[in-house]
Amino acid sequence: MAQLSARPFTGRHMALVMTGFFGVVIAVNVLLANLAVSTFSGTVVDNSYVASQEFNRWLGAAKADKALGWKLDIARAGPGTVRFTLMDASGRPLTGAAVRAQADHPLGARAPVAMNPREVAPGVYEAALPAGRWHVGIEVRAHDHVWHAEDDAL
């Protein structure tokens, strides 16, 4: 049986191993940083000072919305159509409401879509919305109240 001569592990080998290891780590970090920057603008609000001044008003509006006890269910009604089902605090359909909604793409990759849903059945409102993932904000005016809700269901 022939004997294999083992080559010694030298400093050059170690330098190549270390260079390869850190090269892979740096390449992965650059790739992930590039993906993170290209898919999220980093903007949550345009002006944080102005947003902070409105915060207490937003909390009061949210408390008033919750006190009404109205409920919203958002679902796809078919390709390109979204359905809003609205119920009052006792679970009855919320009919005859003036409904406005806006759909925003979660990462800002698409332009916002304004919607004016129309009532197709008692408490059921439908509007056109392209396929994809959307964050939907809705404003409902009914029975001398204005109610707001948001949902990421789409």
Image (cartoon, grey):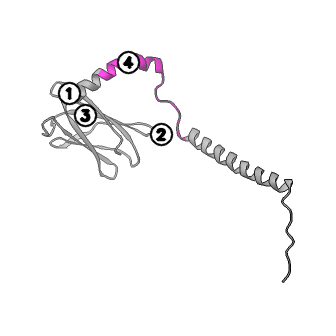
Q: Earlier in the sequence, mark 4 or mark 3?
A: 4
Q: Is residue 26 left or right of residue 145?
A: right
Q: Residue at x 15, y 34 (%)?
A: 89
Numbered tag placed on residue 107 in the rendering:
2
Which one is closest to the eye, mark 4 or mark 1? 1
Numbered tag placed on residue 23 in the rendering:
none
The residue carrying mark 1 is 67
Three-letter code, disc 1: Ala
Which one is closest to the eye, mark 4 or mark 2? 4
Dots 4, 1 in contact, CB < 8 A: no
User: Which span of residues is magenta-colored?
Assistant: 39-59
Three-letter code, disc 2: Leu
- The chief SS type of the magenta part is helix
Q: Residue at x 20, y 39 (%)?
A: 86
The residue carrying mark 3 is 99
Residue 71: quadrant of the picture: top left
User: Disc 3 and disc 1: Cα gap in Å?
Assistant: 19 Å
The residue carrying mark 4 is 54
Dots 2, 1 in contact, CB < 8 A: no
User: Disc 4 and disc 3: Cα gap in Å?
Assistant: 24 Å
* Mark 3 crowdedness (10 Å alpha carbons): few <14, some 14-19, many ≥20: many
Q: Earlier in the sequence, mark 4 or mark 2?
A: 4
Q: Is residue 77 magenta?
A: no
